[in-house]
Image (spheres, rainbow, N blue to C red):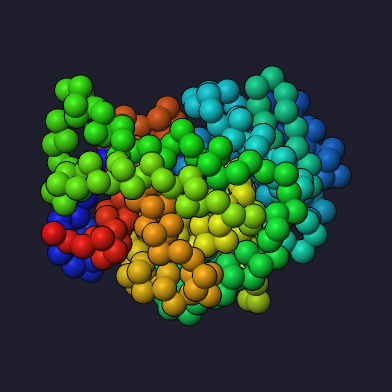
């Protein structure tokens, strides 16, 4: 990661957060035979495709309108420019197809996997992403909906990997930074001074996150404003490729750094006041927060992945918010 916010710097003095937007492809970039398959699945000819900018996938994300006036949402990605993206879409198709009826998520209408391309079709939800910066009323709606979601998905109704398997290779950021420093591969230039002073302790705490995050709840594991849609009476949770089984408070914790960086209240206050946190073990929460923050901090110091030019800045900002929260929990010395 780059330089996190200095210790003690007021959140409202930070620069505006980076947008949660990547580089989308147009609907026309999908191979013609797959566009034909989409029309066959939907039962009509596509006459309009409007690209949706939110999110980081380097593929197609568009609202489709058929000649009949019916609508659908399409996600599609090919083998380039990012070789990992098709696998992520396949994982999303598996999860979306398995979510029980009534889950507040767009219903999967169909999916196609051909010649390295993966296409997913969802019902089109007539909703909007939460306003940025966050306003209190919309944040309250999302937090209430998250409580309901965790209750409905405990125990998990879906065969999904445990969180330790899903993120075991990823949540090693502080240990990787410490190893890179020892081997002369990273001078730690630009690393937040507090994080640098506590690097050894953070690496040790991080090692215990897998046990700390254990649970029986199916969690989304990638909640941010751009993965939420608000209608007049519901909150929809979209984009489920990282779904896994974890503690019921995992989604709440993982979402709050993005809420904070996008103008929301201090993470500690929101977490402590939420019903999902009431039964959470404080030491377990700290260990998972350490691991999540280390992931953001270490990843943001790496080159941008192919086709995802804006991801590192977004991770950098989440790392800053995570460090602010960690300093509240651990102490600012």
- Residue farthest bottom in this picture: 137
- Residue farthest top in this picture: 115
Tell me which residue sits at (56%, 57%) in the image: 247
The C terminus: image quadrant: bottom left
The N terminus: image quadrant: top left
Give the x, y percent position of residue 126.
Answer: 66, 64
Give the x, y percent position of residue 285.
Answer: 42, 59
Tell me which residue sits at (16%, 35%) in the image: 188
Tell me which residue sits at (65%, 76%) in the image: 233
Q: Is residue 54 visible?
A: no
Question: Quadrant location of residue 31?
Answer: top right
Q: In this orientation, which residue lies closer to the viewer: 254 or 18?
A: 254
Q: Check the image and report above or below for 207 versus 318.
A: above
Q: Check the image and report above or below for 64 versus 265.
A: above
Q: In this orientation, which residue lies closer to the viewer: 27 or 193?
A: 193
Q: Is residue 155 visible?
A: yes
Question: Quadrant location of residue 16?
Answer: bottom left
Q: In this orientation, which residue lies closer to the viewer: 233 or 292?
A: 292
8 on left or right of 202: left
Give the x, y percent position of residue 315.
Answer: 35, 46
Question: Quadrant location of residue 155?
Answer: bottom right
Q: How many marks?
A: 0
107 on left or right of 51: right
Q: Check the image and report above or below for 229 versus 46.
A: below
Give the x, y percent position of residue 6.
Answer: 15, 56
Tell me which residue sits at (13%, 36%) in the image: 189
261 on left or right of 78: left
């Amino acid at each position: 990661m780059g330089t996190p916010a200095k210790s003690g710097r007021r959140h409202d003095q930070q620069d505006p957060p980076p947008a949660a937007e990547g580089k989308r492809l147009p609907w026309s970039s999908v191979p013609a035979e797959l566009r034909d398959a989409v029309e066959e699945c939907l039962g009509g000819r596509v006459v309009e495709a409007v690209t949706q900018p939110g999110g980081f996938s380097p593929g197609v994300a568009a609202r489709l309108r058929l000649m009949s006036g019916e609508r659908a949402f399409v996600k599609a990605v090919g083998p380039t420019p990012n070789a990992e993206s098709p696998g992520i879409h396949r994982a999303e198709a598996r999860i979306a197809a398995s979510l029980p009826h009534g889950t507040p998520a767009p219903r999967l209408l169909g999916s196609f996997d051909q010649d390295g391309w993966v296409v997913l079709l969802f019902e089109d939800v007539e909703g909007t992403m939460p306003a940025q910066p966050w306003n209190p009323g919309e944040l309250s709606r999302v937090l209430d909906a998250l409580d309901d979601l965790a209750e409905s998905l405990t125990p998990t109704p879906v065969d999904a990997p445990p969180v330790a398997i899903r993120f075991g290779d990823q949540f090693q950021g502080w240990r990787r930074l410490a190893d890179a420093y020892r081997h002369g591969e990273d001078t730690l230039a630009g690393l937040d001074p507090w994080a640098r002073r506590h690097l050894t302790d953070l690496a040790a705490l991080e090692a215990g996150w897998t046990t700390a995050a254990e649970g029986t709840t199916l969690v989304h594991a990638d909640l941010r404003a751009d993965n939420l849609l608000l209608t007049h009476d519901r909150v929809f949770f979209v984009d489920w490729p990282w779904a896994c089984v974890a503690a019921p408070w995992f989604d709440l914790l993982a979402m709050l750094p993005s809420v904070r960086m996008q103008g929301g209240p201090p993470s500690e206050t929101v977490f402590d006041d939420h019903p999902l946190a009431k039964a959470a073990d404080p030491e377990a929460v700290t260990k998972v927060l350490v691991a999540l923050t280390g992931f953001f901090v270490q990843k943001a110091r790496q080159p941008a992945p192919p086709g995802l030019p804006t991801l590192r800045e977004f991770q950098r900002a989440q790392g800053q918010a995570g460090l602010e929260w960690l300093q509240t929990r651990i102490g600012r010395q």
